[in-house]
Each structure stands twice: as structure tokens, then as C-alpha cells.
Amino acid sequence: MSFGPSPAGFGPPRPPAWTPPTETERTLAEARARGDWPAYYDALARVRLYYVMSRESYDAQPDRTHRTFARDPRTGAERWELFTDGMLPAPRPDLVYSRASLRWIAEAWNPRCPPTIVINPGTPCELPLPYGPPGTTDWSRTAERIGAAPSTAMRLRALHVGGALHGPVAHGLACGALLCVSNGSLWNALAWHGSGYDGERRRLREWWGITNRAEWQHHLRNLLACEASSSVWEFALSLRRTIARDFGGHVDTGYWRQAVATVIRASSEGSTVITEDGVTKTDPRPASETEARIEGVQRLIGRITRYEARMRADGILAENRYVTSVEAWDLGRASKMARWGLGARFATLPETESAVIRAGRAAALAYRSWADFSTGYILGRCLHFDEEEFGDWYQDMVAAHRILMSEAGSPWLNIPFR
């Protein structure tokens, strides 16, 4: 089926010996090859696009837009080059990108802009398009009709060229797959651009308070050491693990609560510790402080058991299983933090790879399977954010879990956990 001549005089190309990196480039190349421009525009309007920006200008004025235009190598005419995420090169300190929707591209036009935008230049899905006021071209009308690109759609996406699919790096990347699926990002993209240089800087600043390399390193170390989350969560879960090991598996919730009270009271009575400096005695804690701590941990046990009951009802936790640890919450975020740091240029690619591998190895020591890892991550996320509302913080992860445990291309079905 044909829709007439290609924009700017481009005709259907000869089939190239080329493997599209992702399904996006495949869809664009196929639409271009058959001259189906409505399908091309539709696909383009449903993904995020990247363009080169000036890092120096952004660092000086982060609240402004900094577009960098290029020259057509054949004609020398100025043009605005746009790329889909599968076509981006490995991050470099001197080359950074910003991310936008096709609708934003259309609305960002002004008379000083070049007359042409070019999608994925130099590839079989390349297409030059006229650039003018919003609504004046077929592609801008498509962008307006579709609206903001659903880049955060819940789906499993992979980089089939240039992305790890097996081995230690892929295993570590898969530890961050829940969040990748939830955000519709490429789960195995080690050379991370994410939401663009400006978007990754903003993410780290707003969510983590990270504004420089030293702060990024500090948070990454804490995540890899599983020291970023509340130690009380792990105390409660580790005590249940001990009881389960001593008593054959099943742990009565009432007994768990009682054991918490016993352990906390015993540790609050004061003790004698032998160190290199000699004998040190610790004073007993006040009874009111001890009882308040007991009450707090017992409330936490109630939250944990209610989340587990909901996970069993939703089919992501087996009837005879419970969450053994929430270290996955830190390790999954470590896998992502390594990549966020690269996108923000606080990290190098070798540093990111090393951290991702460490996250995967730590996960394999702490859990027995991807399913166990997943429920640990979900519980940690919910204890951190959800407040027992069972809202998006919970529901999004349940949906991502189901995708990763069922779709044929899932790393959790193709990469051994241990």
C-alpha cells in the first residue's frame, strides 16, 4: 500500500543488510520501505526523540532549552537531527542529548529554526521532513492528534544490537528491569541516555538530591551495600528468617511479634563489649524508648504481612512463601543508579558496567530466583512509598512483574538468576 511520493523526494530504499536495534527502528524502516508515511508519522509520534544539546550551555542555564543544529553533509544546509533511542551512540562527556516528543518538536518551531528535520540520519529509517509552524505539515498534524508520546507505557523493551542479552552485565541490568518495564525504557541499555542529559540531571537532583559526582558515588555505594533503606525493615525480616530456619519454615505472626519484643528488650538492657581499646559498657535504654521501638516494629510486621497477603492474592507470591529480604529494593535501584549516573555524566561507562555487575552478584547471593528478588523489590518500594494505599507504587510493579515473568523476550525467563 502506497501513500504517494516520500517527503523531500525520498523514494523507497533498497532493503539494507541492517538489523534494527529496537522495535521502533524496525517499524520506521518498514514503513519507509513501503512508502507508508502515515504509519511512519504515527510510530514517530508514539516514541521519544533525542537531539544534540550543548552541555556547556545547559550547565550554565539549566532552565532553558539548548538545541544544537547540524549541517547536511551533502548540501551544507542547516537541519535539525533527531534520533530514536536505539540509534544513540555510547555516552561521551562532550556529546549529550535532550529528549522530547514529536509534538514538542512541532510546537518548538520558530522562524529561526532550520527548514528541515531529519530522523535517524544515515540509517535505513532516515527521513527528512519539512519543518514549519505547528499544524502545517502532515507529521505535525499527526503529532498533534496523538498528543504527548506515551514513553512511560508499561512494556518490555530491549536493545537487540549493542545491548547485553546474556552474561554478568545482562544479569545486573535485569535487576533494574521492573523499573525499566514500568517506564517503557530499554532494560539492557548499559550505554544509558534515559531521559537525556538534562532529564537525568533533573531526576537525580529532584529525587535523590544528587548534584555532583561525589554525591552520586555516595548514593551508589549505599545502594550496593544495601544501606540506603531502613535497617528496621531488614531487622524484622531477618528475625523471621531465623525463626523459620529454627522451626521448619512456617512462622506464626503472633510468635514473630513476640520474638521482636524479646530481642529488642534484651538488646536494650545494656551490655559489655570488648574492643581494641578495652572493655566498653553500654547503658540500658529507657523503658519508654524500648517499648516505643517494640510497638513500631510490630506495626511494621502488620504492614509486611498485609502486603504479602495482597501479593499472594495477586498471584505474585506463592501461598507457602514470604518475602525473605528487601535488599532487592536497594540492589534494583543500584542497577538503575549506575545508569542514571552515566546519563548525567557523573559516571564513566566502565564504572557503570562494574556497578551493574556488582548489583547482580549481590542479588544472586541474597535471593534464590527472579520471583523472590521481585517480591523483595516490590515490598521495599511499597514500604518506602505506598503507605498501604495499594496505589500506583504497588500496582505498577505488579504489572511489570507479570510482564517479566511471562513474556518470551523477558530477561527473567532467559537469564539464570544464579
Image (cartoon, rainbow, N blue to C red):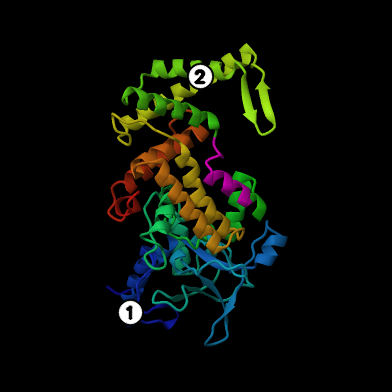
The residue sitting at the right extreme is 60
**Magenta segment boundaries in residue numbering:** 216-229
Residue depicted at 45% across the width and 80% down the height: 8
For this view, does 5 lie left or right of residue 333?
A: left
Q: Which residue is depicted at the point 60% across and 50% down?
A: 204
Q: Position of residue 309 (x, y in %)?
A: 35, 27
Q: Nearer the viewer, residue 307 or 112?
A: 307
In this orientation, does residue 354 appear? yes
Q: Is residue 339 left or right of residue 274?
A: left
Q: Residues within 10 Å of mark 2 (few under 14, many from 20)?
A: few
Q: Amino acid at mark 1?
A: Ala
Q: Position of residue 303 (x, y in %)?
A: 45, 25
Task: Give the SS element for disc 1.
Answer: loop
Among the 4 quarters of the image, the one containing residue 112? bottom right
For marks 2 and 1 on the same chain, the one whose residue lies earlier in the sequence = 1
Q: Is residue 292 left or right of residue 47?
A: right
| Kind of element beneath mark 2 | helix
Q: Which mark is residue 79?
A: none
Q: Which residue is mark 1?
A: 17
The overriding secondary structure of the stretch rendered in magenta is: helix
* 379 to 120, vertically: above or below: above
Give me the residue at 65% from left, 55% from top: 213
Q: Which residue is mark 2?
A: 263
144 versus 138 height, above or below: above
Residue 31 position in % (x across, y down) = 34, 71
In front: 69, or 242?
242
Residue at 39% x, 77% y: name it. Answer: 124
Distance from disc 2 to disc 1, alpha carbons, whole Å, reads: 66 Å
User: For the residues carrying marks 2 and 1, which lies nearer the camera in this image?
Assistant: 2
Q: Could you say which is closer to the camera, residue 50 or residue 171? A: 171
